[in-house]
């Protein structure tokens, strides 16, 4: 009865027809799932227009040249912070890696050529370099999703954490969000199971909180979280210079950026939106703004985000209760018909709901954009071939002296 009322309230009575054909156990699991989902995400479907961008202005950041003049001071400040356990690293590994086309966790992908070199392995190698430089171990918090948690943990175990001290590693699982069809009706994935997908990378802090990790001794001294994507195999993690520059700036967040090479490059850009720092997605940036140049002929909106951020822990705790906007993405979502037939759609047939980490930047209130050299620190593995792919990442790793 409770379920019927719930489904009626949210105009989802079509699900009752599925329930009729299922056994007791399937009905029970399904009902439990229905009672635990975050229904409020469905409201974002009613918003027909994307969030109005507001007034966009350039944001001031640190250029490579400026960083160079203060490098030693930044490094010393950052090294001291890492050594005192003030920096924890958060690896976002809950995504589905659909563009790469693998059903396994993206971090388990082998990018080696003559030897195996897994994405996770390369990230750990990057982190180990910083640990050696600072003579300290950095707590590493790995966010997974329900879909890949078991496989990710097993992979780290199997490879002995690639030599990283296991005591410094924790896993936590992000939330899932329901998927709907084009008419906003919840989709069913299989008998007794709603179709769901990871709820985006914007909720990592809430998931960390829910997992009870913030109370652990390991994070007792944490003042900064360095949050980064799984797929940039060249990035420096807990980078002392970046940490030092952000601390000394007095800002509540830092964002590593690469200078855009051309106006049409598909990368989110750091800017001020209505006076607050934020990221404007490439498809939201007008052609006029994308092409705007300063007197030296350089693009003004050129700070391309690399998804490597520093967040001030105390500020995060303060804003944790605030709602992050939910974005909808049209995707191909496999589903079960009421007649019990499984369908693998060839075209996008529904929506997934995601919160995005770039929206957190705005909530933090202040941000230091920090430039890094693209060829040395930005090799995202998004696709198998072409732009931002296994191929381009291999080329860049080789250029940086890593034997593949
Ligand atoms: P992407 O937006 O590139 O998504 O994630 P993805 O899932 O890896 O790849 P596609 O779009 O399906 O091809 C950027 C980072 O955020 C993480 C990803 O693992 C990646 O490190 N992420 C994304 C999560 O941790 N959870 C999510 O729900 C989504």
Image: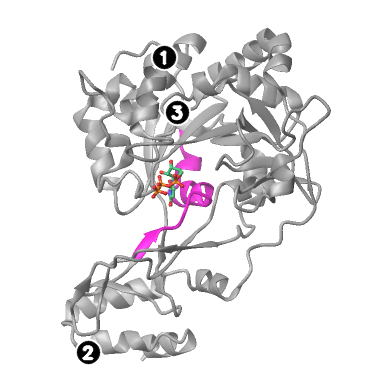
Residue that carries the numbered disc 1 in the rendered image? 399
Depth-wise, is mark 2 or mark 1 nearer the camera? 1
**Disc number placed over residue 20 in the picture, else none:** 2
**Drawn side of residue 235 relative to residue 361, left or right:** left
Q: Earlier in the sequence, mark 3 or mark 2?
A: 2
Q: Is residue 191 magenta?
A: no
Q: Earlier in the sequence, mark 2 or mark 1?
A: 2
Q: Quadrant of the C terminus?
A: top left
- How far apart are the two marked residues, 1 and 3, measured between alpha carbons? 11 Å
Relative depth, front residue between 229 and 259: 259
**Drawn side of residue 88 relative to residue 316, left or right:** left
Colour pattern of the rendering: one colour
Give the image location of residue 206, x and y in percent. 52, 51
- How far apart are the two marked residues, 2 and 1, measured between alpha carbons? 60 Å
Q: Secondary structure at mark 2?
A: helix
Give the image location of residue 212, x and y in percent. 45, 47
Residue that carries the numbered disc 3 in the rendered image? 379
Crowding at dot 3, Cα within 10 Å, few <14 / some 14-19 / many 20+, comes out as many
Residue appearing at x 74%, y 47% in the figure: 288
Residue appearing at x 40%, y 40% in the figure: 382
- State yes or no: discs 1 and 3 in contact (Cβ < 8 Å): no
Against 279, residue 107 (above or below) is above
Q: Is residue 215 magenta?
A: yes
The quadrant in which residue 110 appears is top left
- How far apart are the two marked residues, 3 and 2, measured between alpha carbons? 50 Å
- State yes or no: discs 3 and 2 in contact (Cβ < 8 Å): no
Residue appearing at x 60%, y 60% in the figure: 325
Depth-wise, is mark 3 or mark 2 nearer the camera? 3
Tell me the magenta residue range: 196-217
Crowding at dot 1, Cα within 10 Å, few <14 / some 14-19 / many 20+, comes out as few
């Amino acid at each position: 009865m409770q379920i019927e009322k719930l489904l009626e309230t949210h105009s989802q009575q079509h699900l009752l027809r599925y329930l009729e054909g299922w056994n007791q156990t399937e009905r029970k699991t399904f009902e439990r799932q229905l009672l635990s989902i975050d229904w409020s995400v469905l409201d974002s479907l009613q918003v027909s227009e994307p969030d109005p961008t507001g007034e966009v202005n350039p944001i001031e950041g640190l250029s490579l040249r400026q960083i160079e003049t203060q490098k030693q001071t930044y490094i010393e400040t950052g090294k001291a912070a890492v050594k005192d356990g003030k920096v924890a690293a958060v690896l976002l590994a809950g995504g589905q890696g659909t563009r790469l086309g693998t059903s396994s966790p993206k971090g388990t992908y082998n990018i080696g050529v003559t030897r195996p070199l897994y994405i996770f392995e390369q990230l750990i190698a990057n982190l180990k370099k910083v640990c050696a430089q600072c003579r300290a171990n950095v707590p590493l918090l790995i966010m997974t999703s329900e879909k890949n948690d078991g496989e990710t943990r097993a992979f780290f175990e199997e490879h002995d954490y690639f030599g990283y001290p296991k005591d410094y590693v924790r896993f936590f699982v992000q939330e899932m969000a329901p998927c709907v069809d084009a008419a906003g009706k919840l989709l069913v994935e299989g008998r007794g199971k709603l179709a769901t997908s990871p709820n985006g990378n914007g909720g990592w802090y809430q998931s960390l909180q829910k997992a009870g990790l913030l109370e652990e001794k390991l994070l007792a001294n944490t003042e900064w979280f360095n949050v980064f994507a799984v797929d940039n195999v060249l990035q420096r993690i807990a980078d002392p210079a970046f940490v030092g520059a952000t601390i000394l700036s007095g800002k509540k967040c830092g964002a590593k950026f690469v200078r855009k090479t051309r106006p049409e490059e598909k990368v989110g850009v750091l800017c001020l939106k209505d006076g607050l720092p934020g990221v404007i997605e490439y498809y939201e940036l007008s052609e006029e703004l994308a092409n705007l140049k300063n007197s030296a002929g350089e693009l003004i909106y050129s700070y391309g985000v690399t998804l490597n951020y520093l967040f001030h822990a105390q500020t995060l705790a303060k804003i944790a209760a605030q709602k992050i906007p939910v974005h909808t993405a049209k995707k191909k979502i496999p589903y079960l018909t009421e007649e019990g037939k499984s369908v693998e759609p060839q075209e996008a047939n529904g929506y997934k709901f995601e919160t995005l980490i770039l929206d957190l930047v705005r909530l933090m209130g202040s941000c230091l954009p920090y430039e890094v050299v693209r060829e040395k620190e930005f090799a995202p593995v998004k696709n198998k071939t072409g732009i931002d792919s296994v191929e381009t990442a291999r080329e860049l790793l080789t250029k940086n002296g890593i034997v593949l």
